[in-house]
Amino acid sequence: MSGKNLFLRYASLNEQRCISREDLGFYHGIVIGAIYEFESGFDVGSPQSFFAPLKHCIDEQVYLGVTVADRHTDKAFFQRAPQINLADHVTVLDRIPAGSGGGSSRWDAIEAVVQTSLNAPFRQDIPPWRIVVLPLQHSDSPTSSSYFIAFVYSHQILDGPSGNAFHKMFLAGLRTAADDAQVPMATTVSVIETRERPLPATLDAPGRLPLSWAYLVSALATELLPRWLAGLLGFTPAVDGGTWTGAPAFFDAATTRTRAVVREISAPLVDRALRASRANGARFTGTMLQLIARALSKALTGHPGAAAATNFVSGVPANLRAAAGVPLDEMGQFYSGTYVKLPLVVGDGPLSADEWAGARESTLAFADVSSRLRDQPFALLRYLPSIRGWMAGKLGKPRDVSFELSNVGVFHDDDEKKKKKGAKKVEITHAVFAQPGHVTGPPLTFNTVTVKGGSLVYTVTWPEGSALGIPEEDEEEFVNGICDSIEADFGRF
């Protein structure tokens, strides 16, 4: 890539948090992947096959053309890269051999791509994103083929739902290239010019996330005062002495890496869960929280480190695009979050009345936090003398959350006309969302995404050997046990 990068603006406080976290080595790329089904006529066998749709995406979204400078400071800033060499952003892997195990082999291969992508840092001299293409075994139809295409990108520039927006644009770019007889699907032109334009205003720009005195005093009291004193004064911290939070925050640049498990819930089971949730006044995220808490309770039974545990605290990111008045497909950082407290209860059979009540209560909490800009946690970052120092200072201390549930929602293929037009068709059948295990945050992270009318794919990620408070050799069995319990409960709706 040639040409001098051009200053755009300084990072906002939450952007700076993500930048510092990544520069410290605590976090790498988010993965939003999708399984694409290509009909005959598509030539997608080389990196050049994806240059035209990628150029379409870069032309549409300014963040795909920026780099981050002064990452090691508390005053990082964004720059426009005048040129992008698309060859630096595309990797095509070897195809899974036909007849190598069917669906299980496919998901094992996807899981391996996801895990590798989560642990791979970005080059600092080019925009921090890439696509990784895994050709899957041919489907039952001799005239079609399948590819898992992972959009791997830095949280420095984009949030989780931005990945869904990327795949909508990428899908549109593929269809346009296939339908345009004047433009070859594969092009050897890899170096493109980026458009000169400003970065959009950030969600946490000064004055945009107001804080009430009551919220500010409560937040400072629970952070600065001992728990017993904060409780006496009426400020209830989310985490208490009975909250399971795994092992204290730990990081070793040479050994810390993310582990990932990928699981699929079939469309009929998802539909039944959605119907049961609506019938009980809850949304899917509220119900999923109950299933995770139940499964984690069961998995922790008998573990010495959880003997005193009585509850969990879950962190749940919230999409604030609607509250901020920006389109739902706008790419950038438009999220905040809330915390939900859940009892440690080992249950079998259908969800109990108390569990459904908890699902309803958390659903209301999510709706509230997503509907306003006032009193959002990230606004408190303005009171930190050094965001980088605050992030680094978390090492060795207890974590402040048990697990995270991040749901980027439902992928909708909005362009039905393009989907059905002509012989050259392409569609997305499955989506996958994953983020790195948190070095200083929750010991376990659950990430969910659904294709409209299709199955739910969820991932579980964690920092290997340092977060769960159990022997490293037992971690995979522990996490798979949680997943098995969740899937058994999906079968009970």
Image (cartoon, rainbow, N blue to C red):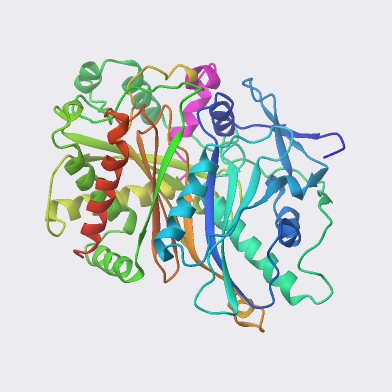
Q: From the viewer's side, name the closer residue of 399 and 280.
A: 399
Name the side, left or right, on which 159 lies relative to 50: left
Residue 237 part of the magenta segment: no
Looking at the image, which residue is at 42% across and 18% down?
395
User: Which residue is drawn at the image coordinates 14% and 28% (left, top)?
Assistant: 307
Q: Which quarter of the figure has residue 70?
A: top right
Q: Is residue 436 above or below residue 422?
A: above
Percent x, y of residue 38: 60, 72
Q: Residue furthest right?
A: 3
Occupied quadrant, residue 65: top right
**Vertical arrangement, residue 6 with respect to residue 391, above or below:** below
Residue sitting at x 79%, y 45%:
84
Drawn side of residue 126 relative to residue 116, left or right: right
Quadrant location of the C terminus in the rendered image = bottom left
* Quadrant position of the N terminus in the picture: top right
Q: Position of residue 345 (x, y in %)?
A: 14, 43
Segment colored magenta: 371-391
The reply to whether residue 325 is in sight is no
Q: Residue at left 72%, top 48%? A: 62
Q: Position of residue 28 (x, y in %)?
A: 55, 35
Is residue 380 visible from the viewing direction of this image?
yes
Residue extending furthest bottom? 422
Residue 399 picture quarter: top left
| The magenta stretch spans residue 377 | yes
